[in-house]
Image (tube, rainbow, N blue to C red):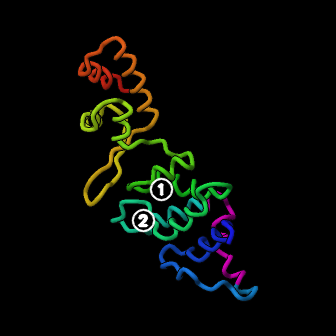
Amino acid sequence: MSDVTQLVRVLCQQFDATVPGPRQRAAAPSSIQGAVSFLRPLDALLSDWPYSFETHVAERIAAGSPQARTLNALLGRWYQQLKTVTTSGPLQVFLKVVIEVAARDFNGIVDHLVAAEVGLDSYLPVAEAAKQLGIGRDSLVQHLKEGKANYRTRRLGARGLCYEMPKDEVGRLKSERERWISIDAEPPRVLRRLFSLRG
């Protein structure tokens, strides 16, 4: 089965976000009339591309469990099946829309590997940001809490928060840190200067 065929099957069989998807090997339409009815969701999803599909994704996110902490958990089998056929190639535009809408509307964890694959990973987890800046994670989180750098939070686990920093903010701080280290090798003073000039 081609990727296009699999994508059409996912989009049509699981069009209604409020209804559980059909069994894995649900029968294909056996008549022209059945095929027309089966394919009808494509008109709603693609007639005003990408806006109609963006609206559909936003509706699926709104219909998902408020307890979900990851995009996989929120969108379930629809997202997992869509992801398998849209990670690369011309169909990647579908996955890109999903990630864009999720980054805007979902306060949980969006898969950074998938976001990077489609060129939309503009944030770094705080642990990775701290590693790139050459400082401890706890020190960086403390500076973020004090409002000394740009960041956002995502829900993680039952009650926790995951801190993320924009890549351009990390790049700016990294450049400043390297410049100050070249003139002042004392780490505490470098760190104070680094976070005193928030862009």
Q: In which quadrant of the rendered image does the N terminus lie? A: bottom right
- Tag 1 secondary structure: helix
Magenta span includes 42? yes
Q: Quadrant of residue 27?
A: bottom right
Count of numbered badges drawn on the protein = 2
- Range of residues picked out in magenta: 35-52
Question: Which amino acid type is shown beneath numbered disc 2?
Answer: Leu
Residue under label 2, please give it.
74
| Badge 2 density bin: few <14, some 14–19, many ≥20, Cα 10 Å | many
Residue 102: mark in rendering: 1
The structure residue drawn at horizontal position 46% and vertical position 49%, both measured from the top left corner, is: 112
Task: State the separation of the CA atoms marked 1 and 2.
Answer: 10 Å
Of all residues, the one furthest to the right in this rendering is: 32
Percent x, y of residue 82:
56, 65
Question: Which amino acid type is shown beneath numbered disc 1?
Answer: Ala
Of all residues, the one furthest to the front in this rendering is: 1
Q: Nearer the viewer, residue 6 or 39?
A: 6
What secondary structure is the magenta-colored segment mainly?
A: helix
Which numbered disc flags the more N-terminal residue, 1 or 2? 2
The structure residue drawn at horizontal position 30% and vertical position 23%, both measured from the top left corner, is: 196
Q: In the figure, is residue 167 to the left or right of 90?
A: left
